[in-house]
Amino acid sequence: MPLAGTPAIFFLSPEGEQALSRWFGKRTSFPALMVSTDATGAWIRPPAGPVEGADTLEPLMLLKWDYVETVTFEYEQETGPVRAPIGFR
């Protein structure tokens, strides 16, 4: 399931709350955009104010799976093209 570009809400584990309190404050969850995922964690675009200037680089953060309790997001399953049933007409 490709998750690149998926907005999600990350619920932090107690270890994650402690480790990330420096960036997110005393929060148990936060919304972020998943840029990509791998076995280590999710590369996310952290919640922040609007970025000024079109040439400004956007920061990304690796959120280790050890710090995540649960991730929620909306997913719509892709359906294949409808085919006519096999048989004679």
Image (cartoon, rainbow, N blue to C red):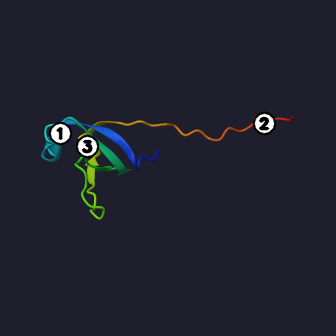
> Is the residue under label 2 in contact with that under label 3 (CB below 8 Å)?
no
Label of residue 50 in the image: none
Kind of residue indicated by mark 3: Asp
Q: Is residue 78 left or right of residue 45?
A: right
Label 3 packing within 10 angstroms: few (<14), some (14-19), many (20+)? few
In primary-sequence order, the first of circles 3 and 2 is 3
Kind of residue indicated by mark 1: Glu
Tell me the residue that label 1 is attached to.
Answer: 17
Label 1 packing within 10 angstroms: few (<14), some (14-19), many (20+)? some
Q: CA distance from mark 1 to mark 3?
A: 11 Å
Label 2 packing within 10 angstroms: few (<14), some (14-19), many (20+)? few
Which of 1 and 29 lies nearest the eye of the viewer? 29
Q: Is residue 40 above or below residue 75?
A: below
Residue 33 rendering spot, x and y as whole percentages = 33, 46
Q: Which element carries disc 3, helix, strand or loop?
A: helix
Which of 81 and 18 lies nearest the eye of the viewer? 81
Name the residue located 26 percent from the left edge and 61 percent from the top edge.
53
Total marks shown come to 3
Q: Which element carries disc 1, helix, strand or loop?
A: helix
**Residue at the extreme front of the image, as rendered:** 53
Which of 24 and 54 lies nearest the eye of the viewer? 54
Tell me the residue that label 2 is attached to.
Answer: 86
Kind of residue indicated by mark 2: Ile
Which of 78 and 14 lies nearest the eye of the viewer? 78
Tell me the residue that label 3 is attached to.
Answer: 66
**Residue at the extreme right of the image, as rendered:** 89
Name the residue located 62 percent from the left edge and 41 percent from the top edge.
80
